[in-house]
Image (cartoon, rainbow, N blue to C red):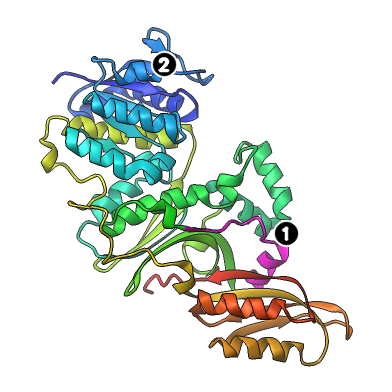
Amino acid sequence: MKPVRVGICGLGTVGGGTLNVLTRNADDIARRAGRPIVIEQVAHRSVHPDCDITGINATSDVFEVATNPNVDVLVELIGGYDIARELVLTAIANGKHVVTANKALIAVHGNEIFKAAHEKGVIVAFEAAVAGGIPVIKSLREGLGANRIEWVAGIINGTGNYILTHMRDEGRAFEDVLAEAQALGYAESDPTFDVEGIDAAHKLTILASIAYGVPLQFEKAFTEGISRITAEDVEQADNLGYVIKHLGISKRTDQGLELRVHPTLIPKERLLANVHGVKNAIAIMGDAVGPTLYYGAGAGAEPTASAVVADLLDVARDISTDHHYRVPYLAFSGIDEDVSQLPIMPMEDITTAYYLRLLAVDRPGVLARVATILAEQGMSIEALIQKEATEGELVPIILLTHRTKEKQMNEAIREIEAMADIAGPVTRIRVESLDEGE
């Protein structure tokens, strides 16, 4: 069979890794695909130092690749929103299949891109867009296809997990570990996308769409970062039998779908609680299979390249198949913009348990008033930690509540912060049991 000819746009970390894997493992890849996969052209502004493009047709214009009649598949690895969107749509308009690792592109513009691809009969593959080298997209879209998915919860940003891991293991402050992560190259100079949960929300949006058969709806995802987590919060969570992780969580409920990214206390014995450093892991609960866990490298040159090349293998196998018989982009046929039967729930309607940390004057009646406020909002206290102090001094109070609606908790926090004996804002971290069906 004739080779599949690939054009790679972007030769940074992932692009360079993809070129190296395609070159190094060319024979094995050809045997798996049933035909050779060859690099026809590359487009780049700079070349990763570990990447050799000697003898390869190269250009600085990515749109030259998108319109090159000799290219069958465009591999988009430039990142970002606008230029990447224009590049991918141009490639599709020219009848080219697309492989991308760009989670932001898929989460924000995926509905438009998939519609254009369907009309043109071409494949858009994006395994590398979520969790790097972990084949979670294929597992969720195909391997778990018999299941009604109940929930998805994941550590899907390695930078945040690295920071929280070292805060817990070494008792260090957020700012200190972030600076170390930046020095090691795990965090960008502007870490906002990672530590404030935007990157994770892109990935969760994609997972939820595939899990439940709804359009991509990134704009409806609730996002909260980890920058306000303190070493004391990490320590107190440990005392209560929990670990703090920055999770993306999506659940199916009678009211609709939850779609949220935030710091979360989870029990120490949970599998996700024991995922450390820059690793990623996604737990998925299916009604037939029960709980499954997908763990591994969520970023890096060759782990992500592994997923890119796996997508190229799928394209090579399906390139001659009528597009009506291919696996749908988002697992379900007929996804449209009508999501009235399965809406994304507003955060205030979501029910969880809560960890609260407040700084109070050590004076009789203060704790009783806090408990009364919580009770008036329909919630009770499950656990309490209060350090000894001299009367009149400020003392931290740690509370663990039973499950309640976010709306009620918001009102309770507003009333607690208005108390004269409470100093500063109340720290609130949501708590999830993530029952794994033991």
Q: Residues within 10 Å of mark 1 (few under 14, many from 20)?
A: some
The amino acid pointed to by label 2 is Asp
Task: Identify whether 116 is placed above or below 12.
Answer: below
Query: Could you tell me which residue is drawn at 24 percent across and 14 percent down?
Result: 70
Residue 156 makes an appearance in the image: no
Camera-near label (2 vs 1) is: 2
Magenta region, residue range: 222-240
Task: Identify whether 234 is placed above or below 22.
Answer: below
How many numbered marks appear?
Answer: 2
The amino acid pointed to by label 1 is Gly
Query: Could you tell me which residue is drawn at 30 percent across and 38 percent down?
Result: 113
Q: Nearer the viewer, residue 386 or 31?
A: 386
**Residue under pointer 1:** 171
Q: Residues within 10 Å of mark 2 (few under 14, many from 20)?
A: few
| Quadrant of image for the N terminus | top left
**Residue under pointer 2:** 61
Q: Residue 426: image x %, image y %?
A: 69, 72
Query: Could you tell me which residue is drawn at 38 percent across and 39 percent down?
Result: 128
Query: Could you tell me which residue is drawn at 16 percent across and 41 percent down?
Result: 326
Q: Residue 145: image x %, image y %?
A: 22, 56
Residue at the top extreme of this rendering: 55
SS at circle 2: loop
Q: Residue 404: image x %, image y %?
A: 50, 80
